Amino acid sequence: MSYFTADNLETAHEIISRYPRKKSALIPLLHLAQEQEGWVTDDAMRQIAELTDTTPAEVKGTGSFYEMFKFHPVGTYMINVCTNLACQLLGGEELLAHAEEALGIKAGGTTADGMFTIEDVECIAACTEAPCLQVNYRYKLRLTTDDLDQLIDDIRNGRATDIPEHGTLGLVRQHIPAGAGAGIVAPEQATERPVWLARNDTADEGGEA
Amino acid sequence: MPTHDYVPHAPGYVDNDGPKIVTSRFVHEDSHTLERYEATNGYDGLRRALDRTPADVHEEVRDAVVLGRGGAGFPAGVKWGFMPPGKFPYYLVVNGDESEPGTYKDRLLMERDPHQLIEGCLITCYALGLSQCFLYVRGEMPAAQENLAQALNEAYAKGYVGKNIMGTEFSVDITLTWGAGAYIVGEETALIESLEGNRGMPRLKPPFFPAAIGLYGQPTIVNNVETLSNLPWLLVNGSEQYKAFGSEASPGSRMVAVSGHVNRPGVYEIEQGVTTFRDLFYGDNFCRGIRNDNELKMFVPGGGSAPWFFPEQLDLPLEGRTVGAEGSMLGSGAIMVMDETTDAVKAALRLVRFYARESCGKCTPCREGTTWEERILQRILDGEGRPSDIDKLLDIADNISPGPYPVAADPSQGLDAVPFPPKQTTICPLGPSSVAPITSTIRRFRHEYEAKITKRDSIPVMAAPMSSDPVEVG
């Protein structure tokens, strides 16, 4: 039984084809699995192992290093509040405390209805727009506590249409059209000197490669 | 809130009259599209590169002294020369895993001008004979991933990337790939590990740097997003024009993000080695002063890993070597400004906590040391500190980074600067980075630490007196 849906399985094969070695596709495939179900299940890891010629233990070994992968269900909306220095200076911690109070959970917790998870995260690269947070990795900048209340209300009432459910990253995927690629092969099969470097020989004896 | 002349579609970027080498298209709302890119000299740099020999293009970049903008500031043209000849395939890995506290310029470059970065990658691949390029984008940046994917799809369709680029024999593929939330993956060898599908733990270097043994054991060039984004402009305008900006040792421009207690925080493109910190914080063209006319207390000049500066360092120009000699680094161009109301211990704890959380766990001094530092700072802040805690912090710091740690001069105490970089007992600089906030604040604001310490040291446990009686066994 395939864990991935037919569409996602096709995407998975396409992702793998873009790397010289299958194992390199491990992190993108974990994201794909998380996109399908909101978190990474054991079945997903088993199939990723098959697809990349690794073992489920290797998949989990790699995956568990990275904070974005969740190995248990989390809220449909992850509210990640930045409290690193630049945000701390302008009220990031107060914003986090307000979120905790408004949702009745502590950072790391999920609301009983499975709607929200709050996380206290490190710098999310929007420091001049402090205090800021991400909901499912979509930025909300220069937030006041009132803005946050409004945001939570919007999400609850289905008005936050710009935010996809947890797991979805980029809505646009890379796609190399058939015949347009230079050809991605394993390093052992690419030991020839790239042809255009021959231009160095004619112009100047003893070019660098 | 003060009024801002920000660009609405590029939140944080301030459009002023500074140099525009990498941010020239940010004013356009459609700056990320191929249409806009082609209308504004797009892919002209690549076109010109393809009219020259690869070695000649490399020479141009070496001439221009394009310093790495990711943190270490090493010249890209020199780094490119470190690959062993003939050991094909060579790879290019683009470091877009921007996560240094306070930094964001690569995200804007990826979101707002993805084609410029793609063109920079192509120029590099052409110059060095690289077989494939990997664009590694931080996981938490879906907008950057989307715009890059869209741009790559457009570029493939138009024949700018892929097979027989612009009708020549030059062919290369660019693979968009992304991370999943780990600061350490910004370190180049950890990034390569991550790209191979492993836990992102740094590899030991020297002796073998990625240029010799990198991705899949092959020679690999790892460059930062901003570094590569400079190349299209450079190829169109030439190294002489590039060097007309900035100082002799640091030509060109660089992007800095100024955050914290300033009136107009923002991302600015500035001239390297010319603009001073004072210009930047107080200039009308830049941040327009400290909020509420407060006094400046301290600032972080180059990302969370940089030792801190104080008002005495305000007149230094933003120039790598000068700042290094004065005890810090420009790093990733992230400047965090703190006014007189800031609690130095609390601010130091926040950065130390970051390093404790993000330590990958490979080297003991960092894995254990950062956690101890965090706990001790936390208990000082909670009013549970003991007098010996300050020296204990310095002792743990010395374990991670032995010897005098880089620090700015403090004329009021007659103390000189210790130049950058620090020594380290760890594989990568993450551990030593956690020491920066501690030594910077303890040397300058020891009294603030002491004022928070309320407990006594515990009495040492005495060893039991030796008994002269023979011990009965059995």
Image: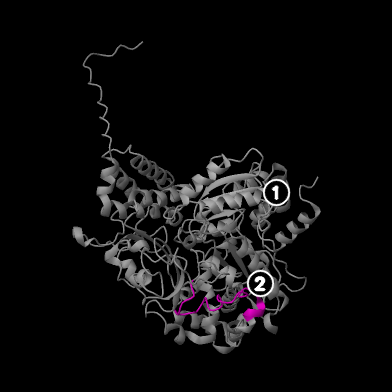
Q: Which region of the structure is painted magenta?
A: B14-37
Contact? badges 2 and 1 (CB < 8 Å): no
Q: Nearer the viewer, residue B463 or B413?
A: B413
Separation of residues labelled 2 and 1 (CA atoms): 31 Å
The chief SS type of the magenta part is loop
At which x and y percent is residue B418? 28, 61
Mark 1 falls on what kind of element?
A: helix
- Residue B34: in magenta span: yes
Residue B226 in view of the camera: yes
Please say which color scheme the image uses.
Answer: one colour
Quarter in which the N terminus of chain A is drawn: top right
Which tag is nearer the camera, tag 2 or tag 1?
Answer: 2
Q: Nearer the viewer, residue B75 or B213?
A: B75
Judge whether B395 appears above or below B262 on screen.
Answer: above
At which x and y percent is residue B38? 64, 82
Judge whether A8 appears above or below B112 on screen.
Answer: above
Judge whether B380 appears above or below B85 on screen.
Answer: above
Label ID, residue A49: 1
Chain letter belonging to callout 1: A
Q: Residue at x 38, y 71 (%)?
A: B280
Label ID, residue B169: none
- Residue B28: in magenta span: yes
Which residue type carries mark 1?
Ala
